[in-house]
Amino acid sequence: MTGAESGHGAEDLALDRQLCFALYAASRAVTTLYRPVLDALGLTYPQYLVLLVLWEHDDRTVGELGKALHLDSGTLSPLLKRLEAAGLVWRRRGVDDERSVRVGLTGIGRALRDRVTEMPSRIACATGMDPDEVAGLRTALTRLADRVNRTRLEPGVILQQRGEPT
Amino acid sequence: MTGAESGHGAEDLALDRQLCFALYAASRAVTTLYRPVLDALGLTYPQYLVLLVLWEHDDRTVGELGKALHLDSGTLSPLLKRLEAAGLVWRRRGVDDERSVRVGLTGIGRALRDRVTEMPSRIACATGMDPDEVAGLRTALTRLADRVNRTRLEPGVILQQRGEPT
DNA sequence: CGCAGAAAGATTGTGCACAACTTAATTGGA
DNA sequence: TCCAATTAAGTTGTGCACAATCTTTCTGCG
């Protein structure tokens, strides 16, 4: 004991002990890994994620894209405009509901898929983990995100919310 | 088999199978978890990370902070200016080397530490994971980031680099 | 019908990340 | 000694993230 300690949480604030920093650093590292490949395709990483969603299922609203990616229109609207300007997607107002905007792939956008089909295996190789490890880590992260997204911390108190939608 | 498949990577491009997206989503989810608490302190999440480093070891150069956080001066310079403007840190040119800028905590910056000592346990609680799980995930992420940071993907070829500094 | 409230996107403003470039200080030879 | 190369920060420009706000459209209910 070197001096006054408050009795808890004394040295748990070390950067290397924070799960949050490990997540933040790993996420940026993996994004950096994608960068040279995506640069060659004229894509940013978030743009690539949008294309992943559209390659799975075309012609979706901005809101549906946002739900899949956990992004709001403040992020997606300008991003989609850039994808449209690049000729990869089209955007048009919904016919039945003029409030919504539907987004879909152009021929160029659809064709781009063939240029990234090897990315997952290349990334997997770069991680140095075997497929089971990767799947396990992915599952753990997804469960963590799901759990955390149902929790709100008040500035002074811990609150758990929304165990079920009732 | 529904049609022509290139023989590999056919449907591995589903968003929910991407480790990169799980990382990206989990990282943003945890940052969002911190936000209300940090907002009350007038801090952003990257600013909080800088303070974590300084609370561990005061009076460091911008480069040292960058190495700890994997951030460059383009990110840190304006961030540190804002922390300085908020009265939490000081900045001054190095005495021996006028190129470097040393950064340290003010009394206010140091005192702020007492207001976040409970964050790690609150976050741990919000994750719904026991301490061993959290530690295991943190270790896996750190190893992943280390491994990935030693790898460069060429637009068409996989290159492994820097096994050891020789 | 008429209108209050809700819903879907778009816009605005702040603060990262990161690449590319600039400036200033230092270092290491020839 | 001198100067080319290196190093440390800072600056500039682009593109996310996200909060707050705004506009347009739709829905429900009197």
Image: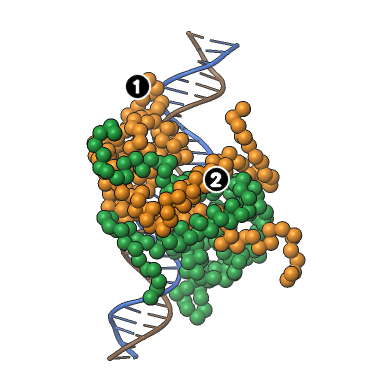
Chain colours: A green, B orange, C blue, D brown
Image quadrant occupied by the N terminus of chain A:
top left
Residue corresponding to mark 1: B95
Residue at mark 2: chain: B
Q: Is residue B124 visible?
A: yes
What amino acid is labelled 1 in the image?
A: Val
In the image, A122 versus C19, the foreground residue is A122
Residue corresponding to mark 2: B144
Horizontal side, residue A138 vs residue B93: left or right: right
Answer above or below: position of B97 versus B145.
above
Q: In the image, what residue occupies the spot 47% across and 56% down? A: B26
Picture coordinates of residue A2 (x, y %)? Answer: 28, 32
| Numbered label attached to residue A155 | none
Marks 1 and 2 sit apart, C-alpha to C-alpha, by 38 Å
Picture coordinates of residue B142 (x, y %)? Answer: 50, 44
Picture coordinates of residue A67 (x, y %)? Answer: 48, 66
Horizontal side, residue A86 vs residue A24: left or right: right
Q: Secondary structure at mark 2?
A: helix
Answer above or below: position of B22 versus B54.
below
Q: Quadrant of residue D9?
A: top left
